[in-house]
Image (tube, rainbow, N blue to C red):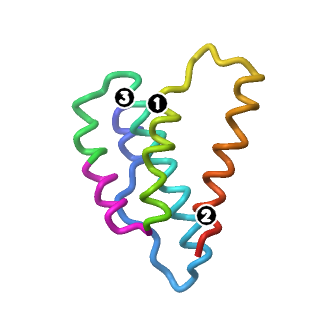
């Protein structure tokens, strides 16, 4: 399971000739990194966290400020999700999550 979660974390942002595609790809990569780190923190895989944090720092250092500036929002949100969240609470959370993601992905 550790290897599975570790494989989610990427350290290279997309850099192609298509800035729109790169923006969407990097927003996605950042949220995947945040999710993997949050899940490992929640299940206390502290040893593997060292490598994940290194890879994430590498990714964020190369990503645009729009992407790197939102990482903590996503990591904190995902790390602190309650297991007993009901549908109404989830419906309230989802629009802000999507708005934050779209602001990153659509910024060129």
Q: Residue 46: where, in percent of width, then height?
A: 26, 29
Q: Is residue 54 above or below residue 105?
A: above
Secondary structure under tag 2 reads helix
Residue 62 colored magenta? Answer: yes
Magenta residues (range)? 54-64
Q: Nearer the viewer, residue 43 or 70?
A: 70
Q: Residues within 10 Å of mark 2 (few under 14, many from 20)?
A: many
Q: Which residue is mark 1?
A: 79
Earlier along the polypeptide chain: callout 1 or callout 2? Answer: 1
Residues at marks 3 and 1 touching, judged by CB atoms closer than 8 Å: yes
Residue drawn at (64%, 44%) of the image: 97
Q: Which mark is residue 41?
A: 3
Q: Earlier in the sequence, mark 3 or mark 1?
A: 3
Q: Is residue 40 magenta?
A: no
Residue 93 located left or right of residue 31 = right
Image height of 55 relative to 43, above or below? below
For the residue labelled by badge 3, is the local secondary structure a helix, a strand or a loop? helix
**Label 1: few (<14), some (14–19) or many (≥20) C-alpha neighbours in 10 Å:** some
Residue linked to disc 2: 105
Prevailing SS of the magenta stretch: helix
Q: Secondary structure at mark 1?
A: helix
Residue 4 sits above or below residue 88 on the image: below
Q: CA distance from mark 3 to mark 1?
A: 7 Å
Q: Gap between marks 1 and 2, in whole Å? A: 22 Å
Please report whichever mark, 3 or 2, sits nearer to the chain's N-terminal start: 3
Q: Nearer the viewer, residue 73 or 21?
A: 73
């Amino acid at each position: 399971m550790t290897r599975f979660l570790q494989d989610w974390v990427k350290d290279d942002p997309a850099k192609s000739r298509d800035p729109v595609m790169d923006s969407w790809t990097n927003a996605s990569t950042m949220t995947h990194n945040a999710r993997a780190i949050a899940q490992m923190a929640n299940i206390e895989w502290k040893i593997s966290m060292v490598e994940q944090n290194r890879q994430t720092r590498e990714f964020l250092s190369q990503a645009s400020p729009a992407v790197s500036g939102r990482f903590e929002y996503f990591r904190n949100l995902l790390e602190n999700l309650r297991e007993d969240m009901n549908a109404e609470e989830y419906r309230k959370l989802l629009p802000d999550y999507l708005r934050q993601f779209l602001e990153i992905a659509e910024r060129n």
